[in-house]
Image (cartoon, rainbow, N blue to C red):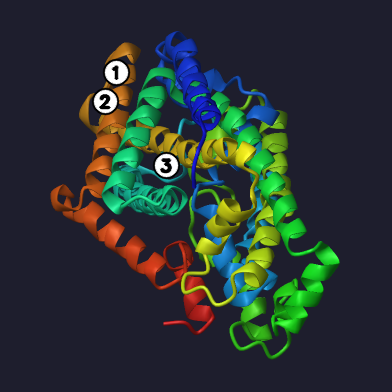
Amino acid sequence: MRLTIIDWLIIGAYFAFNIGIGFYYKARAGKSTTEFFLSGRNVPWWLAGTSMVATTFAADTPLAVTGFVAKNGIAGNWIWWCFLASGMLTVFFYARLWRRAQVMTDVEFAEIRYAGKPAAFLRGFRALYLGIPINCIILGWVNLAMVKILQLIFGIGKFEALVIVLGMIALTSAISTLSGLWGVLVTDMFQFVIKMSMVIILAVFAVNAVGGIEEMKTKLVAAGRGDALNIVPAVGSAWMPMIAFFVYIGVNWWATWYPGAEPGGGGYIAQRMFSAKDERHSLLATLWFNIAHYAIRPWPWILVALASLILYPGLKDPETGYIRVLIDHLPAALRGLMVAAFAAAYMSTIATQLNWGASYLVNDFYRRFWKRDRSDAHYVLASKVATVVLTIISGRGNGRRAAPPLVLVAHQCVERSLRDGDGVRRLAFPPARFWAGQR
């Protein structure tokens, strides 16, 4: 895909604005660890909620949804729609309680909830387990997805794409290190507006390319893919029999762990609730997140995915259908904004993972077990160091020969998942594979 000078200026302006936000919030983030990780517990609901939505809108998410739709139709999204029940429990039963707890991380709460050395061990173990290996897996699949996107959009090799991704990781890390959670939240807001606007625009052009909504439905039926329009799996569906569907909506949402999707919230979702101004803002932020996450945001992706089934039937890797629609049917004048939108999707997730992971490493391990009773300035510096360390681990994970074994395994799992055509489902929802009978 060819970009003009104007496209490159738009992309450059996007990065410059993000850097400006980082410097603007530098002084505020350096005041204390509460400011660095929780924005002083003074975040309005609309900003905290939008940040939750932006964080879960990664560069790979539209591709993963396209893969679900291509393989199993709209109903394929129940693999993650089933978590809506968990999200609504968090809104009405847990959001106020999380804010009231006055903790910095959900891991810290474990030691308060239980007692003694076992509770302390649980806190330290979860801090390291979630902060490093789980973080590496999430960073791994997001990095590799961005490499895949860059290769398709620019027609470049894997090495060149890796170099660009490493540069974006470094820039995102610099912004997160400078500005803490305030910078993450504000850039999330800016990035969400860009990427949501562009996926809606792309959906409009995709639907027009196949002749409109009614023509899309007619062509899908004619191509033998009318089942792709089903909102729920058909009775007797081979990929998800009705009993498996009931397992998804009745069991899987509480039996599967995924950051922020477990009953009660957790991870970076809990971090946003901790940072809210008060309990009311915590509840409203989580409510807005669940409405946007499940009811609004997926539909532009789904429309593009359905259009790709008509425009590019029989793709070996159906996830690439999303990028092909972008390349072939988005007007040239909007290509720069679309590239910026993918960069925004990537950077919002990376920034959150770095800040969230650093909060575990510093608050729940370093401060709790290693260096106790130091000044807040000391812990702020440790927080910035932890952010940089996580960045280096992620960056080295992209350089295969120099990768630590843990990161290398994570990247190999992600690559195998992408190669097999299941997107991130095999990593994010392993129990779902079991219930669906997929081995």
Q: Which residue is depicted at the point 65% across and 85% down?
A: 243
User: Disc 1 or 3, which lies upstream in sequence?
Assistant: 3
Q: Which residue is mark 1?
A: 381
Q: Is residue 17 left or right of residue 204?
A: left
Task: Locate residue 220, reporting x and y percent.
Answer: 73, 76
- Residue type, numbered disc 3: Val
Horizontal side of 280 relative to 349 (left or right) equals right
- Image point 62% across, 34% down: which residue? 194
Sequence-wise, which precedes: disc 3 or disc 2?
Answer: 3
Q: Are marks 1 and 3 in contact (CB under 8 Å)?
A: no
State the residue lying farthest toward the right. Answer: 214
Residue that label 3 marks: 107
Say left or right for 291 vs 156: right
**Pointer 3 and pointer 2: residues touching (CB < 8 Å)?**
no
Q: Secondary structure at mark 3?
A: helix
Residue drawn 65% across the image and 42% down it: 198
168 lies left or right of 47: left
Q: Which residue is mark 2?
A: 385
Q: Secondary structure at mark 1?
A: helix
Amino acid at the residue labelled 2: Val
Mark 1 or mark 3, whichever is nearer to me:
1
| Cα distance in 3D space between marks 3 and 2 | 20 Å
